[in-house]
């Protein structure tokens, strides 16, 4: 039964996330928000809602380890799995904005989140508020520094003509799917952890984290296979920033998150920091400003090592 709950949960999160993005973008067009701003804010936040609801549901149901490791694991999966596999399908060009703004901001958010949790073994409402305000400041800098005619590939112009009734239906489907998807996924994952004798933290950083990254992975690989621009490294790093600032930040504001699993702060978060840090030397090794197939393979291989360590060490 727990496997069925997990599969249904994943499915509903994918469906709910898709409908939420569509309805959010369509609604933004109604309010005459520019396409650039929609792509940088509305789409980015909407795609983080599944992680947010899973983390919030876990925290409220007494499983804070899942809440924290969902974010830590998702950020590791975004680089090791999503970026690695996509680069193996087709090389990814690195834009200057990556090492000038996005990467330093991601590292700052990651280190600050680690400090907050290490300081008193919890992430409280004040610290969560700081993370959220930091995200707002980052978005303001991002939008101000972008060209007005910037092309945002994630935003579909056809959504500007959608009727109000259809937007309402999309919102209803998205919200309902995300609610039940997050609830069933957390419940099923907790049962699986109990059945196979590993901690909820391990399930959070592996099963749940990979599950919430599957939609992005699928879209990236399909785009790369079609020889289209799969993902920009900047957008992927932006996703990691949103995960820390909005998912952990907002969850902590609603309910403080205690650190109940010591290995989160002594092992898992250092893997997250390591995967983030290694991107800088990676883009300068070999062919500069590019993540090619070999570099992609190295990322996936490292991610595989992480998963082996995760399950062999247990806990």
Image: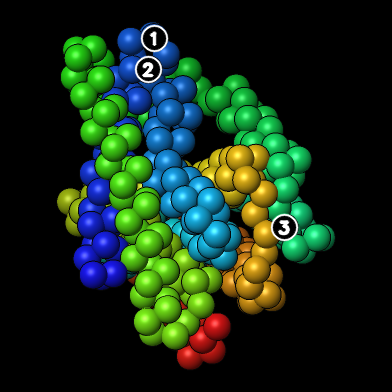
Quarter of the image containing the N terminus?
bottom left
Residue projecting furthest to the right = 119
For disc 3, the marked residue is 122
Instruction: Indicate which label's residue lies in the foreground, 3 or 2.
Output: 3
Q: Is residue 47 left or right of residue 252?
A: left
Q: Earlier in the sequence, mark 1 or mark 3?
A: 1
The residue to which callout 2 is attached is 28
Q: Is residue 186 visible?
A: yes
Residue contact between numbered discs 1 and 2, judged by CB atoms under 8 Å: yes
Q: Nearer the viewer, residue 210 or 171?
A: 171
Question: Could you say where residue 33 lies in the image, as x and y percent from the top left?
Answer: 42, 13
Q: CA distance from mark 1 to mark 2?
A: 5 Å
Residue receiving disc 1: 31
Residue 160 in the figure: left or right of residue 109: left
Residue 179 image position (x, y, % from top left): 35, 43
The image quarter in which residue 175 lies:
top left
Identity of the residue drawn at 48% across and 90% down:
312
Circle 2 SS class? helix
Chain-order first, disc 3 or disc 2: 2
* Residue at image location 23% in from the left, 12% down from the top: 164
Query: Label 1's element?
Result: loop
Tally of numbered tags: 3
SS at mark 3 in the image: strand
């Amino acid at each position: 039964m727990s496997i069925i709950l997990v599969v249904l949960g994943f499915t509903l999160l994918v469906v709910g996330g898709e409908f939420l993005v569509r309805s959010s973008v369509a609604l933004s067009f109604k309010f005459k928000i520019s396409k650039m701003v929609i792509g940088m804010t509305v789409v980015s936040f909407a795609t983080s809602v599944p992680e947010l609801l899973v983390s919030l549901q876990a925290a409220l149901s007494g499983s804070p380890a899942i809440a924290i490791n969902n974010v830590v694991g998702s950020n590791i999966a975004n680089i090791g799995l999503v970026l690695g596999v996509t680069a193996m399908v087709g090389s990814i060009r690195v834009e200057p904005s990556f090492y000038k703004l996005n990467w330093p901001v991601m590292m700052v958010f990651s280190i600050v989140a680690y400090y907050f949790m290490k300081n008193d073994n919890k992430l409280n409402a004040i610290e969560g508020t700081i993370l959220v305000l930091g995200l707002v400041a980052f978005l303001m800098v991002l939008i101000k520094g972008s060209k007005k005619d910037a092309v945002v590939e994630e935003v579909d112009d056809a959504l500007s003509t959608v009727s109000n009734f259809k937007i309402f239906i999309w919102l209803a489907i998205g919200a309902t799917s995300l609610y039940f998807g997050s609830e069933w996924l957390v419940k099923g994952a907790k049962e699986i952890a109990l059945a196979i004798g590993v901690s909820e933290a391990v399930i959070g950083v592996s099963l749940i984290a990979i599950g919430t990254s599957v939609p992005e992975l699928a879209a990236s690989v399909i785009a790369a296979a079609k020889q289209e621009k799969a993902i920009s490294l900047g957008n992927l790093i932006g996703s990691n920033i949103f995960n820390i600032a909005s998912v952990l930040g907002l969850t902590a504001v609603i309910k403080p998150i205690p650190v109940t699993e010591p290995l989160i702060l002594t092992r898992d978060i250092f893997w997250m920091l390591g995967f983030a840090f290694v991107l800088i030397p990676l883009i300068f090794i070999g062919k500069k400003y590019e993540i090619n197939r070999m570099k992609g393979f190295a990322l996936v291989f490292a991610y595989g090592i992480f998963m082996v360590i995760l399950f062999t060490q247990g806990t």
